[in-house]
């Protein structure tokens, strides 16, 4: 059977750029698959905020992310790219993470060059480790691969800290160390992607996260800049949060949900995306056999 890593590589080759959408719950993973996406993303910021209710500051553990991964890979066949932040420690921790995420069904992980006490990539005052420490992180990750097709993606946050040339140097050093793909974080101009793509000669990812440093480039614009993957880590999460808040406030203020009913997914739609009726039919069949 084809591995998750192989599937992800095929998806990257088939769609330019491959749209990779964040799913913060297993149900959202089902919605994304039903909407036609060919890959999914587990966002570190999403695990922190959505699953744990805490900020994206390196507080969540490997197990927090693995729980979400397992739930998602249990209900979808799409290849999943996972944000493993800084890899939770030194070389042994990173190696352990790569093995654990491969076992959990991930297709790819991205690991970044921020210090352990990391921040969101689109916030000020980020700090990064030296290039040689980052290269060691990548070597540890590559060395731990049990499936040669599993994708190690190197993320560099260096643009905001040291500028474009340093970020490109780091990306090249990571590719030399065995990184399969590059994630240049918090890009501000479209032509920067082109420069990264030219320099590294492996697929690059553009993080099109909202309300950050990167303009909302379209897929056509990204294709013109040689971007291979367009990432939307938290788009559905942000929208769902706003919708939830609206329901909570209206229900509290008016004493009824009647005014917000038309913003809700119906029971029927909820069930359709779950395959509820197929489950029910199986259940009925089971009872019949028993009778
Ligand atoms: C991609 C990211 O690492 C994430 O955890 O989803 C975040 C996204 C965000 O905070 O908007 C990041 O860019 O740091
Ligand atoms: Mg993150």
Image (tube, rainbow, N blue to C red):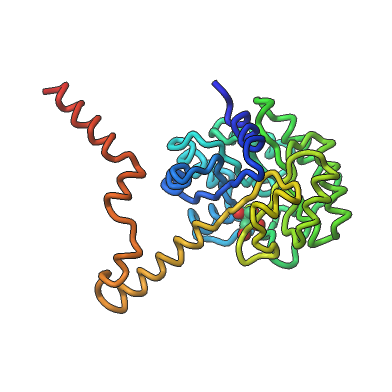
Closest to the observer, 45 or 230 = 230
| Quarter placement of the C terminus | top left
71 to 267, vertically: above or below = above
109 left or right of 262 in image = right
103 left or right of 131 in image = left
Residue 118 visible, this angle: yes
Closest to the observer, 59 or 162 = 162
Residue at horizontal 67%, vertical 52%? Answer: 220
Name the spot of residue 101 as percent of width and height, x first: 59, 36
Name the spot of residue 236 as percent of width and height, x first: 50, 56
Residue at horizontal 23%, vertical 36%? Answer: 280
> How many numbered marks does the figure carry?
0
The quarter of the displayed image where residue 178 is located: top right
Name the spot of residue 29 as percent of width and height, x first: 47, 45
User: Furthest residue to the left?
Assistant: 291
130 to 186, vertically: above or below = above
225 left or right of 220 in image = right
259 to 188, vertically: above or below = below
The quarter of the displayed image where residue 265 is located: bottom left
Residue at horizontal 35%, vertical 42%? Answer: 274
14 left or right of 154 in image = left
User: Furthest residue to the bottom?
Assistant: 253
Residue at horizontal 69%, vertical 59%? Answer: 121
Residue 58 visible, this angle: no
Name the spot of residue 120 as percent of width and height, x first: 66, 60
């Amino acid at each position: 059977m084809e591995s998750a890593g192989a599937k992800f590589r095929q998806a990257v080759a088939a769609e330019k750029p491959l749209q990779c959408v964040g799913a913060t719950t297993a149900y959202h993973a089902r919605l994304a698959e039903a909407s036609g996406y060919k890959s999914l993303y587990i966002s570190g910021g999403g695990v922190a905020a959505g699953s744990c209710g805490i900020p994206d500051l390196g507080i969540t553990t490997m197990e927090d992310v693995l729980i979400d991964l397992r739930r998602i890979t249990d209900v979808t066949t799409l290849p999943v790219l996972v944000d493993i932040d800084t890899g939770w420690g030194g070389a042994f921790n990173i190696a352990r993470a790569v093995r654990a995420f491969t076992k959990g069904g991930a297709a790819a992980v991205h690991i970044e060059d921020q210090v352990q006490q990391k921040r969101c990539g689109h916030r000020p005052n980020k700090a990064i480790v030296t290039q040689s420490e980052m290269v060691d992180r990548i070597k540890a990750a590559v060395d731990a691969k049990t499936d040669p097709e599993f994708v190690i993606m190197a993320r560099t946050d260096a643009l905001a800290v040291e500028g474009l040339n340093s970020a490109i140097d780091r990306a090249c050093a990571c590719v030399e160390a065995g990184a399969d793909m590059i994630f240049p974080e918090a890009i501000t101009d479209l032509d920067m992607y082109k420069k990264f793509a030219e320099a590294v000669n492996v697929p690059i990812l553009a993080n099109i996260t909202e309300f950050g440093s990167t303009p909302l480039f379209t897929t056509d614009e990204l294709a013109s800049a040689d971007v291979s993957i367009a990432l939307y880590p938290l788009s559905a999460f942000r929208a769902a949060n706003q919708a939830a808040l609206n329901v909570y406030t209206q229900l509290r203020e008016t004493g009824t949900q009647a005014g917000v009913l038309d913003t809700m997914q119906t029971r029927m739609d909820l069930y359709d995306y779950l395959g509820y009726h197929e489950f029910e039919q199986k259940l009925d069949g089971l009872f019949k056999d028993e009778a």
